[in-house]
Image (spheres, coloured by chain):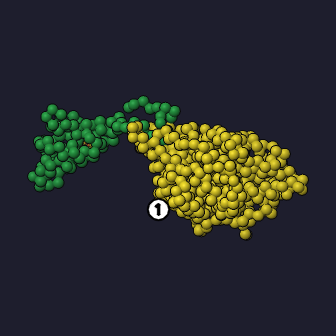
Amino acid sequence: MSKFEALTGNAAVATAMRQINPDVVAAYPITPQTSTVQTFADFVADGLVDTEFVCVESEHSAMSACVGASAAGARVMTATAANGLALMWEILYIAASNRCPIVMSLVNRALSAPINIHCDHSDVMGIRDSGWLILFSENGQEAYDNLIQAVRIAEHPDVLLPVAICQDGFITSHALERVEIYDDADVRAFVGEYKPQWPLLDLEHPKTYGPLDFYDYYYEHKRQQVEAMEHAQRVILEVAEEFNRKFNRNYGLFEPYRLEDAEVAVIVANSTAGTARVVVDRLRDEGLKVGLLKPRVFRPFPAEELADALSHLKAVAVMDRSISFGAMDNAGPLFLELAAALALHGVQVPMADYVYGLGGRDILPHEIERVYRDALKVAETGRVERRVTYLSVRE
Amino acid sequence: MTELRGWREIPIGGMILEAGNSVEYKTGGWRAFRPVFGEAKCIHCMQCWLFCPDSSILVDPENEKMVGFDLEYCKGCGICASICPVNAKVIRKAGEELARDDPRLCIRMIEEGKFQE
Ligand code: SF4
Ligand code: SF4
C-alpha cells in the first residue's frame, strides 16, 4: 500500500533512493542538494539499505567514483547542484561516453559568480550536450516518480546512458509537500534487479573500459551515443506507461495543460509550471484561451512532438530560468531549441522568450500573467514587439 | 592494417571485451628513432629486455641471446640504449658524450627516416 507523507523534495528523493537500494552512492554535499545525501546517509547508517556510501572529497571525485562503480557492474546513484555539477563536468562526459547508467538527482541552483545558492537552471543547461538524459520535475512527487523511472530508463539495454533528474533548489527541494510514497516492495519490483551486461568484476570475462580511441573509432562511438539517445525517447515512454499502470500517475515527454483549444501558451519547466497553472485557470475564468506546456524530457529533446503540440497556437511564450550568453538575442536555451524545433517542423508561430527567476528571484503569478497578456497581444497583432524580455529585472 | 568496422559492429562505449589483445595493436609506426646494433659487442645481459616497455627485445629461446628488435612494436623510446651497460662502457672509454647514433655503441638510435639497411 502506498501512503501519503509530508516530505521535502530532497526527502522524497532520498526515500526513492532508499527504496531503489542502489549498490553504490558517491556524493559530496552541496546546497541545496545536501539534505538528500544527508538523509540517505542516515538510511545507510541505520542499515535500511545495502548501499556502499562513498564519501569523497569533491564532486569531481564523486562522479569519478560513480563511473568506476558503474563500470564494475553496480547500480549507482548520486546527487549534486550548481557548482558541484560544474566540477563534475569532465567526468559527466566520461560517464555518458562509457555508457554508465548512473542516476543523479540534480537540484537546480544558480552557478557562481556572484555566489548564490538559490534556484535557476544555469547548472543543468551547462550539461545539455554532455550525453546525459535530462528530465524536469515540478515538485517533490515528480522528482520521486522520475527518479524511480530513471533507473529503468538508464539501464535499458537500448539506452545505457546516465540520467539527471532535476527539481528546483529550495522551491521544491526544501518545501514540505504531500508526496505519495509507494510500497517499498512495489518500487523494488518496478526497478528490478540490475543485470549489467559488461561488468568489470566479471573476472571470467576480462575487459577494458575507457581505452584510447583515436580518429579511427572515436567517431563511431559518438555515433552509438546518438543511437542510444534516439532509443531513449521510446524507452522513456515505455517506462512511463508501465509506471502509470503500476502507480497510477501519468507521465509523458511533456505535460500539456488546457492546451488543446488554447490560442496562446507558455512553456515553462519545473516548479514555475505549478504557478503558471494557477494563472491559466484565472485567465480562463476571464474567457481567455490560454494554455500551458510543461516540458518533462529535455534530453532527448522531443522536437517533433513539441512542434505538433504547439502547431495550433497563435503565440508562444517560453520562460527560461537561465541565459545562453551570446547566443541569438541572448535568449535562454529552452527558447532557442524550441524556436529551432518549430521552425524546422514548419510551425510558424510568433515566439518570445522571458528570462526569469535568476539566482532564485521570485516569480509571482502577476508576472506570469503579464507574459500571458503579452502573448495574447502578439496573437492579436501577429507581431512580436520584443524577442527576449528579462522579466522583473530592475532597470 | 585491419579493416575498420562500422559503429553497429563494435562494442559500445569504446569497451574492449577481450583481454590480451594489445598484440593486435602494431605500435611500430609511432617510431621516430630506431634501435640498431652497433660495433660494440652485446654481452647478452638482458638489461634491455628487462627495461623495454614494449616487450620489443627479441631473444633467441634456444640460447637465450639478445638477437634484435621487434620493429612491429618498438616505439623507439631509446630506453634499451640508455640502459645498455656496454653502451655505458663505450661512452666511458671514449671520455665524451657520444651521439646516440654513434656506430661505436652496442645499441644506437638512428633517425627513422634516415635509416638504410
Ligand atoms: S627503443 Fe624502446 S621500445 Fe624499442 S626496443 Fe628499445 S626500449 Fe624497446
Ligand atoms: S644490447 Fe646491451 S643491454 Fe641488451 S643484452 Fe646486449 S649488452 Fe645487455
The answer to whether the residue bearing label 1 lies less than 8 angstroms from the nearest atom of ligand 1 is no
Would residue A199 appear left or right of A143 to someone viewing this image?
Answer: left
Determine the residue located farthest toward the top in the rendered image.
B3
Residue A81 in view here: no
A105 or A54: nearer the viewer? A54
Quarter that holds the C terminus of chain A? bottom right
Q: Residues within 10 Å of mark 1 (few under 14, many from 20)?
A: few
Would residue A212 appear left or right of A357 to someone viewing this image?
Answer: left
Residue A52 in view here: yes
Hue of chain A?
yellow
The image shows residue A193, relative to residue A3, as above or below, that is above
Q: Looking at the picture, how far across and down is residue A141, in whole percent? A: 68, 54
Residue at the spot of label 1: A57
Q: Looking at the picture, how far across and down is residue A260, in whole percent? A: 82, 44
Subunit bearing disc 1: A
A177 or A44: nearer the viewer? A44
Disc 1 residue type (three-letter)? Glu
Would residue A10 appear left or right of A205 to someone viewing this image?
Answer: right
Determine the residue located farthest toward the left in the rendered image.
B93
A156 or A273: nearer the viewer? A156
Q: Looking at the picture, how far across and down is residue A54, in whole percent? A: 47, 57
| Ligand 1, image quadrant it occupies | top left
The image shows residue A392, relative to residue A193, as above or below, that is below
A113 or A261: nearer the viewer? A261
Hue of chain B?
green
For the point 81% across and 58% down, which residue is it? A279
For the point 39% across and 40% down, which residue is it? A203
The image shows residue A235, relative to residue A44, as above or below, that is above
